[in-house]
Amino acid sequence: MFCVERNNDTHIYHVELIPRTVRFDELSPLFFPKKMGGNQTSVTEFLLLGLPLSPRMKVILFGLFSLLFAFTLLGNGVILGLISLDSKLHTPMYFFLSHLATVDIAYACNTVPQMLVNLLSPAQPISFAGCMTQTFLFLIFAHTECLLLVVMSYDRYVAICLPLRYSTIMSWRVCITLAVASWTSGVLLSLVDMVLLLPLPFCGPQIVNHFFCEILAVLKLACADTHFTKVVVVSVATLVLVGPLSAIVVSYGHIVWAALKIQSAEGRRKAFSTCSSHLCVVGLFYGTAIIMYVGPQHGDPQEKKKYLLLFHSLFNPMLNPLIYSLRNREVKAALRRRLEKGRPL
């Protein structure tokens, strides 16, 4: 047992053995010497704890996650390339899909590289500014994807329930407005959380129990009462998840009702096939997100939610292009056309 005294004038540390328990935050001035005022000090960097695994398992996962990350970039890059190069995919549905692919690439690039670095080496520090930036970008991409999925469900609703008015309702002006609104709303909703997070004092410890700077994990390190901030963060997450999901359910309720009225079996099959890919993506995204942020927050579910967020950050962006390419005949046809053009005569 020991305590630490610091002479502020000479910066000399004196260690004296005493019979009492010492908390880590009492030692924080040793590790974070930048003053905030009074006796408090501010954290200048964070350490990401990552995944508590053996060194051998970390090497295996590094190889696996690197491969999945490469597939994420390749798959979404192919989707973006096909949509931009193939004129038959210049429709509202694929316009929104291109934005979804962009979000997935950015989503993965924001979290996965840092995790890969920490798998191969001891915990590498991330600066305070870098950590806050990572948190902000993660929130932007997550919120924007939620809203884009709603817009895509609305597009399918108009296509199936109001086919004769589709070209009028889903004009390019409307599509661009909806896409810009999704990105803008994502930024504004993220700013709400960041405005509450940034003013909080962080004076140690600096170890984030996560593989990236996830907002709830960072909040646990604040040296102040964060109850109100946590309530706001969870409330925003609930709003941006439950609200859009409710809108998607209503849209697909109308779609199912309209599809059942179609007389021919071929017509019903075609109507459902155009929505199946989107429904798979919605299920993957909202399923994991609701468990993490809308489910019960009591107890200590941190480790379970950490692995759920790993799936959310790594597997979802990789699976989305696979789902759309394997279950969508137009995308597969466009890919075949591009491959045939690239073949030497």
Image (cartoon, rainbow, N blue to C red):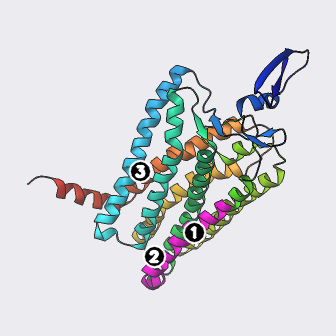
Q: Is residue 261 visible?
A: no
What residue lies at 91% left-to-right and 15% top-to-bottom? 19
Q: Is residue 6 visible?
A: yes
Instruction: Report helix, strand or loop for mark 2.
Output: loop
Q: Is residue 81 left or right of residue 33?
A: left
Left or right position of 174 against 49 = left
Amino acid type for the residue under numbered disc 2: Gln
The residue depicted at 56 percent of the width and 62 percent of the height is 144
Q: Which residues are magenta?
A: 164-191
Q: Secondary structure at mark 1?
A: helix
Question: Is residue 180 shown in magenta?
Answer: yes
Q: Nearer the viewer, residue 247 or 130?
A: 130
Which one is closest to the eye, mark 2 or mark 3?
Answer: 3
In the rendered view, would you say 75 is above or below 303? below
Which quadrant of the figure has residue 148?
bottom right
Give the residue type at disc 1: Thr
User: 104 above or below 266?
Assistant: above
* Residue receiving disc 1: 184
Estimate how packed mark 2 is, as few (under 14), some (14 to 19) or many (20 or more) residues with alpha carbons within 10 Å.
Answer: few
Q: Kindly report which numbered mark, 2 or 1, lies closer to the viewer in this rendering.
A: 1
Count of labels shown? 3
Residue behind mark 3: 322
Question: Farthest residue toward the left?
Answer: 345
Q: Is residue 145 above or below residue 110?
A: below
Label 3 close to label 1 by CB (< 8 Å):
no
Reading the image, the residue beneath label 2 is: 263
